[in-house]
Image (cartoon, rainbow, N blue to C red):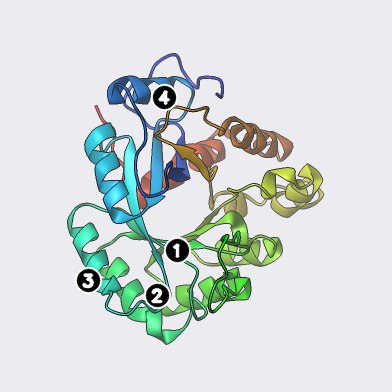
Amino acid sequence: MAKPVQDAWDGVYRRVDVHVHSRPFAGVQYRGSASAYVRKVRAAGIDAVVLLAPGEACDKAVRRFGGDFVIPVPMYYLREMPGRDIRGDMERWLDRGARGIKFIAPLHKYSDERYWPLYQLVLDRKAVAVFHTGYLAARSQPEIPPVEMDDMRAAHVDAVARRFPDLKILMAHFSNPWWEEAWKVCWSKPNVYADLSGATALHRSMSMWGEMFAPDGHLLRDSLAKICFASDVCYLHNGPHEFAPYVEFYQRLLDRVNAPQSLRHRVWAGNAIRLFGLKSAR
């Protein structure tokens, strides 16, 4: 696990992982004291997590681990499913306290008008629209029709942001591999934030990331200010937690661009606090 931010959590969010999952994906596998688990993770430097999972799993995790540790964001595959009322299901979980909705694997591009009523609902509830952007790992079974990664690129999120300028948007994975496109969208749109989660970003050259956020050594504050810390690893289980490499990656990036403390706070927790309406637990 990562080194502690402080010796003990004092009720103030210092680092929030805005992109996590549970294991198994649709449930919560952890065996043992929930309060002891939360203390352990917080001692390792993660004060809260944004759980992206089916609504039932989110609800179970909040009830077990607490709403000041688990921020629930039910996720939806945007594919036609006969007999399923996605909007009604979203309303149910938002009524029960979901802080956002995760959209992934659309049948059409994210900006397609068929999805507008779903985005309007998220806006009306003052929740966050989290979009998977860029490459999506393939399932073991053939997808019919197959997922088109081009339908999930940052350019389509840009179109959504133009149609819904007051909708709070978080782009997961920085539109891998369309990094420049994601950079331009989150820098240009006041309501769009992004994270660098996933197994690809941290393996790219730090020189590339340094030039993106501080070209020729000149820090673009408004660009870095739209980034959120995230890992895309599993929590809420008894095995090892693999978020340490992501903490180290973000730390190297912040050091590379010589980010001031105010921007570091925004990346580690401040943007998450603002987006998801988190409050001190004290």
Give residue 209's position: percent from left, percent from top. 73, 48
Distance from Cα at disc 4 to Cα at disc 1: 29 Å
Give the mark nearer the N terminus: 2 vs 3. Answer: 3
Which of the two marks, 3 or 4, is nearer to us in this view?
Answer: 3
Which of the two marks, 4 or 1, is nearer to us in this view?
Answer: 4
Give the mark nearer the N terminus: 3 vs 4. Answer: 4
Give residue 59's position: percent from left, percent from top. 25, 47
Identified at 29% across, 40% down, the residue is 61
Circle 4 residue = 42
Residue 248 lies, with reference to residue 79, above or below; the image says above
Identified at 28% across, 35% down, the residue is 68
Which of the two marks, 4 or 2, is nearer to us in this view?
Answer: 4
Identified at 22% across, 66% down, the residue is 91
Instruction: Report the residue that reaches farthest toward the front.
Output: 141
Residue 172 lies, with reference to residue 35, above or below; the image says below
Q: Residues within 10 Å of mark 4 (few under 14, many from 20)?
A: many
Q: Amino acid at mark 3?
A: Gly
Distance from Cα at disc 1 to Cα at disc 2: 9 Å
Give the mark nearer the N terminus: 4 vs 1. Answer: 4
Left or right: where does residue 100 sit relative to residue 136?
left
Give the mark nearer the N terminus: 1 vs 2. Answer: 2
Does dot 1 land on a helix, a strand or a loop? loop
Circle 1 residue = 191
Does dot 2 land on a helix, a strand or a loop? loop
Residue 30 lies, with reference to residue 19, above or below; the image says above
Which of the two marks, 1 or 3, is nearer to us in this view?
Answer: 3
